[in-house]
Every structure is written in structure tokens, then in C-alpha cells.
Amino acid sequence: MLRTKEIRIQIASHLILTAIGCIGCLFLSVRAAAILLAISLLQLLVTLFLHRKRTRDITNLCDCVDEILHGADQVTFTKFQEGELSILASEIHKMTVRLREQNSRLSDEQQFMKEAMEDISHQLRTPLTSTMLIVEMMRSPKLSSNERIEYLQELYGLLSRMQWLIETLLTLSRLDAGAVRFQKSSVHCQELVDAALEPLSIAMELKNINLNIQIEENAEITADRQYCIEAISNLLKNCMEHTPKDGKITISAAENPIFTELIITDTGNGIADEDLPHIFERFYRGSEFGKNGYGIGLAFARKVIMAQNGTLQVKNAHPHGAQFEIRFYKTVV
């Protein structure tokens, strides 16, 4: 305790003042000087005791901080009583709780990034391997023109899938980082659905899927046209992939004073109960749902819609099939 400069200065000042007081009292009475000396010494002892207790509390507080710095998770600060030191201990405790929460989030993010990189590597490895095999076979001089054309078509399909995957992942990363600026404008729902169906029209025709479109005449949303088209196209693509041949997809849209709602329903087998809470999670592919996909199309759709004051939910339709419900709110929810 005496190693602290402030305490040494305080004790020296106290002793000097006590000596001056005692010398002054000697001119009046020896008894008064003795009483003053006793009171001063008693006050000095009390001061030293309090300083010692405070030093011990500060040492304990430093020990707690040191434990935290060495990775301890169950350090508490409840043993400190009221006072400035207690306030300091409380603030340090709050700081450590926040640091633990941030550390936990960082650990979760690191684990997510690790799993995401593994999934991306897996998703790209398969088409890349197929691409290399096709390129190797195309080097054969014995290939006929028809075989070469078939290989080129297959190669184009693989490269298109990889391009879509990479571009979608880059867009998702930009959305996560808040680097996307949506160009909002009024878009009629019929125009939105028509544009989203355009790249899927041939595939739907080959599966003979019947489209039932029921869109109110004045139904429109205020959002980024291009991003919304891509999001809805991903939902329609998912419905198409899970709708059997000669099935039906119903698209309806209606507007009220609060929101504009789009509902997409297919006649597939629906979604397993264990998959329903997870199908919007990135890279999630359930036991049957999404088995042939990448697991990012639905995640992308929800991210885009929610970033524009909207909601996207899914449930199983009656008697069978999946139903996606999209709402774009006119006020902030």
C-alpha cells in the first residue's frame, strides 16, 4: 500500500499537519496536544485501514479482469459493495457481457463462413469436374458433329449454372454488407409476374404446367423492379421444379390500403414439416425439398423482399403443394 505515491503523500501531509497542530497546542496545554495527537493517529489508522480495503478491492477487480483476459467465462462482480468501485465493477461487467456476446456472434459467423465455403466448394466442384470431363472428351478427333453439339449444349448448361451460382452469391454478399441500393418505383404486379415467368416459359411448357394467373387490375408495389423480378423468378422456379408434369401453378395478387400481396401456389408434394422452418436458410437442402438445387434461391428471394419492407412466408397448401405468400407493405412495419 505504501508503494502508492498518492498514499505516501497523503500520510506525510497528515503527519506534518498533526505535528504543526501539536506544537501549536503545546502553547495552550500539554493535555490538548496529547488529545490532538491521539485523534490524529486514530484518524490515520482509519484512513490506512480504508485505503488497505480499497487497495484489496482494486486488486480483486484486477484479478477478475485478468481472468477474463485469460478466457474465463464465469467471472462475476457481485462481491463489490456500493460506491465508485462498485460502479466501475458494474461497467466492466457490462463490457464483458457485451464482449462475450460479440465473441459468440463472431464464432457463429466464423462457423457459418466455414460451412458456407465448404458448401460453395462442393457446389462448384461437381459442375467443374463435369466441365473438365466434357472438355477432355471434346478433344477427341473421332467425335461427330452431332456429338460435339450435344457436348457444347451440356457444357453451356453447366457454365450457366455456375455463373448463376456465383452471381447470386455475390449479390447475397452485397445485400449482407448493405452495399445494394434499391431503385424503387411503382411496378404493376402483372408486369412483375410476366417478367419473372419469361425465363421459365420453355421449361414450364416442356412439363406441360398449367398457369392460373389471377391479378387484380390495379395491384402494384413500390420496389426495385429488377431485384423483385429475380426474387419472384426464383420462387416460381422452385415451384416449377417441385410440380409434376401436367401440374398447375397459381399466381394471384391483390392490394389493400396496408399492403400488396402475391401468392404463388403449386400442386407438388409440398414441404416436409421438418424442412418448413429452414427452407429460407442459405445452403439448406432438406431430405426431399431442394435436393437438386443449391439452397440459395429461396434465401436470395427472402433477403431481397425483406430488404424492401416486405415479408415472405411459406406453408403447405390444401390438399397438397407449397404456397409462398409475399407482402409488400406501404408503411414501415
Image (cartoon, grey):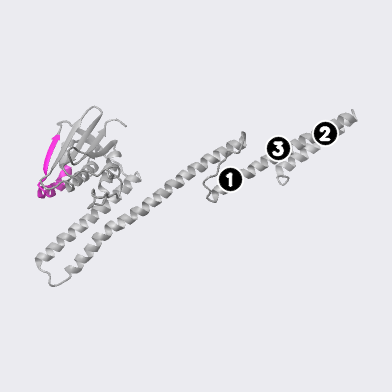
Q: Do the residues under discs 2 and 1 have CB atoms within 8 angstroms?
A: no
Q: Is residue 24 visible?
A: no
Residue at the farthest bottom position: 141
- Residue 251: quadrant of the picture: top left
Q: Does dot 1 land on a helix, a strand or a loop?
A: helix
Going from N to C along the chain, the mark reached first, 2 or 3, is: 2
Q: Residue at x 16, y 46 (%)?
A: 243
The magenta segment: 195-214
Residue 126 position within the rendered picture, expressed as x and y whole percent measured from the top left: 25, 60
Chain-order first, disc 1 or disc 3: 3
> Viewed as shown, does residue 195 lie left or right of 30?
left
* Neighbourhood count class around disc 3 (C-alpha, 10 Å): few under 14, some 14–19, many 20 upward: few
Image quarter where the C terminus lies is: top left
Residue at the spot of label 3: 50
Near mark 2 (Cα within 10 A), the count class, few <14, some 14-19 or many ≥20, is: few
**Quarter-of-image position of residue 332:** top left
Residue 329 forms part of the magenta stretch: no
Type of amino acid under label 1: Cys
Does the magenta run of residues contain 198?
A: yes
Q: Which residue is mark 2?
A: 38
Could you tell me which residue is drawn at 30 percent across and 46 percent down? 281
Q: What residue is shown with label 1?
A: 64
* SS for dot 3: helix
Say which amino acid is labelled 2.
Ala
Q: Amino acid at mark 3?
A: Leu
